[in-house]
Image (cartoon, rainbow, N blue to C red):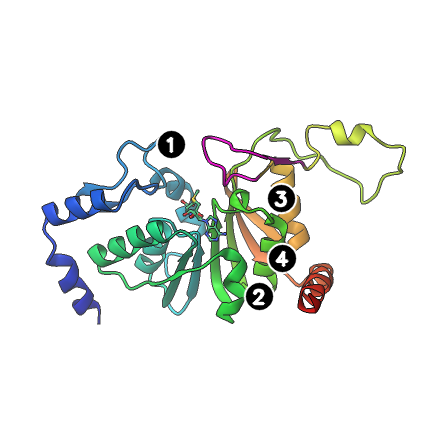
Amino acid sequence: MGGEQLTTASSLTRVDVETRIRQLGKWFHNLDLNGVQTAPDHFLGDYPNIKWAKLQNFIPTNLRGKSVLDIGCNGGFYSLQMKRRGAERVVAIDSDPDYLEQARFAAEVTGLEIEFREMSAFETPSLKEQFDLVLFMGVLYHLRYPLLALDLLAEYVVKDRFIFQSLTRGSDEVALLEDDYPFAETAIFNQPGFPLLHFVEKSYSLDPTNWWIPNRACAEAMLRTAGFEIEANADADTYICKRVNNDERRKYLAELLGSTRKL
Ligand SMILES: C[S@@+](CC[C@H](N)C(=O)[O-])C[C@H]1O[C@@H](n2cnc3c(N)ncnc32)[C@H](O)[C@@H]1O
């Protein structure tokens, strides 16, 4: 099976690859495909290689027998890495067909077998599968309903480990908070370490799909309330989490999905 895929890969010349890369539009992932870089002038540098350099030590080197779901796979960088680590199955989804085309081409050139689906994070319950490892990197702040996405993923899609990354803005402090405060307490909301989700009504960084940008305390609080235990930080904004049972989340989802069905 691997040989068949590699034949396809090796039949492409460097010029073929270069031409196709340019035809596929502007890349967000800088991949090395047959010696050709897909996004050499990325505004974040050699992205996401610089991110992967920190994350790679937190992912098992041998993923044999494991299933992986890469949500918002973009050009396929992380899916390819998971397959290189021996994952049995890698399902890569993105809501943007143009990015998926790039990722498909990257898989073809590298000869790695990945299952691609044009699908939104909100549709993942329809996969009817729980994956050993789910990557949800760089997607949360692009969603209009971010906590719903985390709740759905925790309830329906994540079996064990969850790798989460989000753009964050505001304070990096994380305040130690009580479970409750009296109504008269107002100062707590002005503490830099209080969870804060910044709403972007129009656009941020020329991107109208940037909707909600958490500060660090908020990203962590949202993970916890959805039922993810934070095990480690691979980077300041990148979390290695474990899914835990959470009756609270179940209650809110049941309420929401129940009322949607009645509509
Ligand atoms: C900033 S990029 C992150 C790409 C990659 N995960 C990474 O960390 O490098 C965001 C990606 O999420 C995708 N995306 C945005 N909204 C989505 C949604 N509702 N469901 C699935 N993918 C989405 C975008 O098309 C884009 O490819």
**26 left or right, relative to 240:** left
- Amino acid bearing label 3: Glu
Between the residue at mark 4 and the residue at mark 1, the CA separation in whole angstroms equals 30 Å
Residue identifier under label 3: 220
Residue identifier under label 4: 151
Q: Give the range drawn in magenta.
A: 196-211
Q: Is mark 1 within 8 Å of ligand 1?
A: no
Q: Quadrant of the C terminus?
A: bottom right
Of helix, strand and loop, which mostly describes the magenta segment?
loop
Residue identifier under label 1: 44
Q: Where is residue 90 in the image (x, y as percent from the top left)?
A: 38, 63
Q: How many marks can you see?
A: 4
Q: Does the magenta stretch include residue 207?
A: yes
Mark 4 neighbour density, 10 Å: few (under 14) some (14–19) many (20 or more)? many
SS state under label 4? helix
Depth order, front residue of 50/77: 77
Depth order, front residue of 41/101: 101
Which image quadrant is residue 83 in? bottom left
- Res 207 seen here: yes
Q: Position of residue 146 (x, y in %)?
A: 59, 48
